[in-house]
């Protein structure tokens, strides 16, 4: 039996966080986990994880030493997106950013926005969160822009990250402007919905603006 190591633990924790944040957004419920509970590095790069032999692993590691230690936690990356200052994608603390990293980060920023909304602080933090989405879009263009359509299809749910960012920006715009058509929608009127009907209705309302 294969022994679980640090790399496995990092991935298990990451997918647990992602699952929680996904459910939170889909059904409008408070997230159970926050970015402050994950202080370890991002998982290693996929090519290192997918290495089939020790020789292949060592070859990749020798060519890209930073593929093992990613240099930032989810918390550190989100704080950089929310910070007052921004030195561009080149100054981002996470190195070798991938589409999967940004998939996780867009949900992490969603988590921040949703937590602020449930604590009635959404309007206060909205400008910083909206600014974070603009920075996220800049990073997506760098990390995913060079990918072919086939590569994007192979990235799984990560290829829908721009749509998730679009949805969050619409939500934040509604919070900042106090648009009653949105803040009084079915989605916002209840907590922990048992279907996706409320979210689907909200998306249709955003689409028609």
Image (cartoon, rainbow, N blue to C red):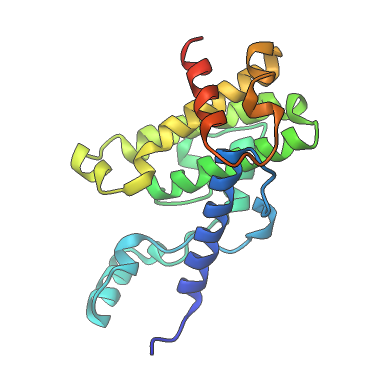
Count numbered badges in the picture. 0
Report the front residue among 34 and 203.
203
Quarter of the image where one finds residue 30: top right
x, y percent for residue 167: 51, 27
In the rendered view, would you say 43 is above or below 112? below
Q: Position of residue 62 (x, y in %)?
A: 30, 71
Question: Is 133 or 89 nearer to us in this picture?
Answer: 133
Is residue 110 left or right of 50 when viewed as pictured?
A: right
Tell which residue pokes out farthest to the bottom in this image: 1
Q: Is residue 18 visible?
A: yes
Residue furthest top as drawn:
209
The answer, for residue 98, to whether it is visible in the render is no
Q: Quadrant of residue 193?
A: top right
Q: Say left or right for 118 vs 193.
A: right
Foreground residue among 198 and 122: 198
Q: Is residue 160 above or below residue 62?
A: above
**Residue at position x 25%, y 43% from top?**
153
- Up/down of 135 relative to 51, above or below: above
Residue 156, placed above or below residue 58: above
Quarter holding the N terminus is bottom left
The reply, left or right, for residue 90 in relation to residue 182 is: left
- Name the side, left or right, on which 184 lies relative to 87: right
Q: x, y percentage for residue 118?
A: 75, 36
């Amino acid at each position: 039996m294969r022994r679980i190591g640090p790399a496995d633990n990092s991935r298990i924790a990451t997918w647990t966080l992602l699952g929680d944040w996904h459910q939170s957004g889909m059904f409008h419920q408070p997230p159970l986990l926050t970015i402050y509970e994950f202080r370890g590095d991002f998982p290693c790069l996929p090519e290192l994880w997918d290495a089939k032999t020790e020789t292949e692993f060592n070859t990749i590691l020798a060519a890209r030493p930073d593929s093992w230690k990613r240099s930032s936690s989810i918390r550190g990356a989100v704080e950089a997106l929310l910070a007052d200052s921004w030195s561009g994608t080149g100054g981002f603390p996470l190195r070798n950013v991938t589409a999967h990293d940004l998939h996780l980060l867009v949900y992490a920023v969603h988590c921040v926005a949703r937590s602020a909304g449930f604590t009635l602080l959404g309007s206060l933090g909205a400008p910083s969160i909206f600014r974070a989405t603009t920075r996220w879009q800049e990073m997506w263009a760098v990390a995913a822009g060079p990918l072919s359509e086939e590569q994007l299809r192979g990235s799984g749910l990560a290829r829908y990250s721009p749509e998730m960012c679009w949805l969050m920006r619409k939500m934040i715009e509604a919070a900042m402007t106090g648009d009653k058509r949105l803040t009084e929608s079915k989605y916002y009127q209840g907590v922990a919905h048992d279907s996706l009907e409320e979210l689907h209705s909200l998306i249709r309302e955003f689409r028609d603006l």
